[in-house]
Image (tube, helix red, strand yellow):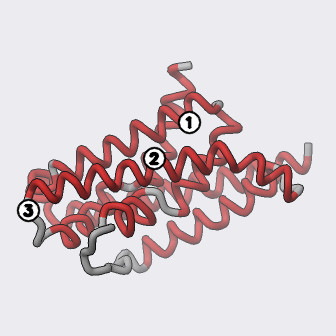
Amino acid sequence: MIRNVLLSFIPIFVAVDAIGVLPMFVSLTKDIDKNKRTEVIIQSMITAIALSIGFVLVGKWIFKLLGIEIGDFMIAGGAILFSLAIIDIINPTKKRRSPGTTLGAVPIGTPLIAGPAVLTTSMLIVSEYGLFATIISIITNILLAGLIFKLSDIVIKFLGEAGSKALSKVTSLLLAAIAVMLIRKGLMQFIN
């Protein structure tokens, strides 16, 4: 069980990309006091966890309804993850919005924390490592993202802007490799 949690933790960690999202979080919350920033972090974590777990729980039912097999989703999901990884590598600037009352839910909770990469990865790894391991990994990774956001001032000073961009590139490269693996496994399901 612990092995499955660890194996499912890594792809979700890469997909969440909390360090890569950190500069955007800082930019979006720079004019907000510490108490309000904490509220935004909590709102973003609740949104991301609810959305990700909801997708994992309902996704299989939707698959059955539409006649989609896991191999189909692995190939489609891998293609999407690969595209997102390439976009992040080539053009790392993501769309920014001005702060509002729902800042924690949108854009931080989704799509910055629980975006297409996290939803696709979560849906795919549940068939590999099980529902319990996937949910534990989702919750742990999103809580870790919240902790990184809470410590954002310290993390940005430690990494610097260049270090945070470099780490984001490495996680995008890992995401591309995971995408290729998903496509390969999806194709193997059709062959078998």
| Residue identifier under label 2 | 49
**Is residue 21 shown left or right of residue 178?**
left
Q: Position of residue 105 (x, y in %)?
A: 37, 62
The residues tagged by marks 3 and 2 sit, at their Cα atoms, a distance apart of: 24 Å
Separation (CA) of disc 2 from disc 1: 12 Å
Task: Identify which residue, 61 or 19, lies in the foreground.
Answer: 61
Circle 3 SS class: loop
- Residue at left offset 15%, top offset 59%: 36
Query: Of callouts 3 and 1, which one flags the residue occurring earlier in the amino acid sequence?
Result: 3
**Which numbered disc, 3 or 1, marks the residue closer to the eye?**
3
What type is the residue that disc 1 sits on?
Thr
Marks 2 and 1 close (CB-CB < 8 Å): no
Residue pointed to by mark 1: 134
| Quarter of the figure with the C terminus | top right
Residue 21 x/y as whole percent: 32, 62
Please report the residue visible at 49 percent of the width from the left and 62 percent of the height from the top.
115
Residue 33: image tag: 3
